[in-house]
Amino acid sequence: MSAAATNQSLGRLEIGVSRTPDGDVLTLKGQLDDQATLSELLDQIGTHVIIDLGGIRFINSVGVREWIVFLGALVERGTRVVLRRCSEPMVHQMNMVVEAGAGAQVESFFAPFVCSGCGSEQSVAIQVALIKDQLLARTVPPQPCPDCGDSMRFDDFPNRYLLFLE
């Protein structure tokens, strides 16, 4: 993070804002719920924002509404929005509610994997640009297990889990 980084809280949501040469980086951690009035952040964000969602561990229906209003306001004013490290709860919401990802580019997301060797369950970050054709074909390549080195397989239904990439 740069020297211009600021941190704040909105209820159970921790927010970090930093300025980088690639744009503003907004890092969200915690719960996206009725206490997270994201519209308060609009004045702090420039014309290009990268939103790191890897720390979102819970989002409820009010949080989804707040997120959609926030994202819509950014897109409406012409802000280029990149979503980085979308957590599994955010992916589930983007799959159920189209507006939860509308107008934004997904750079990376977390996906559930299970190891064939040791049974370990991991949430693995997937870089969209590296395997975009496979993802659009609803194929998720195996990943190496960080615990035993064996092969981990995707542990969800690709046709359902990857809908948000359309």
Image (cartoon, rainbow, N blue to C red):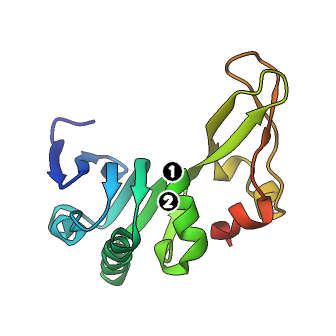
- Evaluate if marks 2 and 1 touch, with contact meaning CB atoms under 8 Å apart: yes
| Residue type of the residue flagged with mark 2 | Met
Instruction: Answer above or below: position of 146 versus 87.
Output: above
Badge 1 marks a residue whose secondary structure is: loop
Residue 73, how many percent across, how many down? 30, 80
> Relative to the observer, which residue lies in front, 53 or 115?
115
Location of the N terminus by quadrant is top left
Amino acid carrying label 1: it is: Ser
Q: Is residue 6 above or below residue 64?
A: above
Q: Quadrant of residue 151?
A: top right
Residue under the point 35% across and 60% down: 49
- The residue located at (19%, 64%) in the rendering is 41
What is the crowding at mark 2: few (fewer than 14 residues within 10 Å), some, or many (at least 20)?
many
Q: State the residue lying farthest toward the top.
A: 148
Q: Position of residue 138 (x, y in %)?
A: 81, 61
Left or right of 45 on screen, residue 151: right
Q: Which residue is mark 2?
A: 90
